[in-house]
Image (spheres, rainbow, N blue to C red):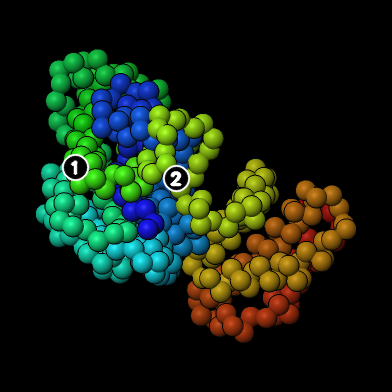
Amino acid sequence: MPCNVLYLHSHDTGRYVQPYGHAIPTPNIQWLADQGVMFRNAFCAAPSCSGSRAALLTGEYCHSNGMMGLAHRGFSLYDYDHQLVRILSAAGYHTELIGEQHISADPRTLGYDVLHEIADTRVNSVGPAAIEALTSGIPEPFFMSVGFFETHRSFFAPSSVRDRIYSLPPPFLPDTPEIREDVAAYKASARSLDHGVGTVLNALHETGLDESTLVICTTDHGLAFPTAKAGLLDRGIGVMMILRGPGFTGGRAIGIEARHGAALSEGERGEAIVQRLIWAWTRPEIREVLRSIFLIAAHEARTRQKLRAFFDATLLPAVAGRWDEDERMLRASLVASQVTGVIMIRWLWEIEPLASVTDERLVALIAPTLQRYLSGRLS
């Protein structure tokens, strides 16, 4: 029988827990790391709550899965059938949701077999519900998502005078009394999170399900401190990720990079695209026009297909064998931005249905720009 999957996840924790060397007592998370594998260089796919979780559960970046903002503010997945819960259900898994999920305003759209109704998503509500579910003869194999509100702000009040006085802020924050107190409050929330994780792991152990269950413990993104959460530096996208399950020898810390959503991603093709975009973003001439590409690609799957077809069938042959690679990429990107702009304006203002915008029509609409960028010198 396939192994069960227990998905434990928190809010805004980054890597600031005990196994990653910080003076934040989280003995249960440490115990999980001692028995499993800890990824020292794990990263989320987006430094915001809904985006990162959506990427992890769909294997797609936010511009591909549709989660370009927060689920409780109107954003959603393009296709709720394309996410891990549905895939595991189709493979015969029983699925249950307890607590936080943050990828849908209505959790019923996610496809869980059981949705546990609890007062809130804090540890004192989530923990008992998880215990009851695990000790009441849950069908196997199962996928259980257990999501904790902790360590989201507002934090708990500091629970230790020593923490308030001696807590060392993260290196990107100044060491002042006010920030030490804030860090002490974070520690109190982290202790609560650890208590919740321990509660669930203990129930798993008491029922004997630990012998047949893969445990995934992670968080959505970095700490809720300035320049961390909602930022693209390591402190914003670095996350804890610890796995334990059947066949694990335990106590391993792996330094290679790991990414949320990598298992279902487009693989090397996607990585090549990312590397080219990173290069392009360093070029002032095309940084702004790339923004329009991202905007339209995030809103219309058919547009992505049309852009790709136009790029492959019309644009690349026009630059093939001319100039060096950097010059070809620059010219192609500039033309692609013009194509994107044309589609975006017509689509947003409903001037011209997308289906009627043929390659020939695109070329006619941008002929002057096409001529400029594909011949002569760039000014």
Near mark 1 (Cα within 10 A), the count class, few <14, some 14-19 or many ≥20, is few
SS for tag 2? loop
| Residue 14 sits above or below residue 261 on the image | above
Going by the numbered disc 1, the residue's amino acid type is Glu
At x 66%, y 67%, the residue is 308
Q: Quadrant of residue 19?
A: top left
> Do tag 1 and tag 2 residues touch (Cβ < 8 Å)?
no
At x 42%, y 38%, the residue is 248
Q: Position of residue 208 (x, y in %)?
A: 24, 45
- Mark 1–mark 2 distance (CA, rounded to whole Å): 32 Å
At x 19%, y 20%, the residue is 164
Q: Earlier in the sequence, mark 1 or mark 2?
A: 2
| Residue 186 sits above or below residue 89 on the image | above
Query: What residue is shown with label 1?
Result: 206
Near mark 2 (Cα within 10 A), the count class, few <14, some 14-19 or many ≥20, is many
Q: Position of residue 101 (x, y in %)?
A: 29, 55
Q: Quadrant of residue 203?
A: top left
Going by the numbered disc 2, the residue's amino acid type is Cys
At x 41%, y 45%, the residue is 47
293 and 88: which one is in front? 88
Label of residue 268 in the image = none
Q: How many labels, in total?
A: 2
SS for tag 1? helix
Label of residue 44 in the image = 2
Q: Position of residue 58 (x, y in %)?
A: 44, 59
Q: Position of residue 215 (x, y in %)?
A: 34, 45
Residue 168 seen by the camera: yes
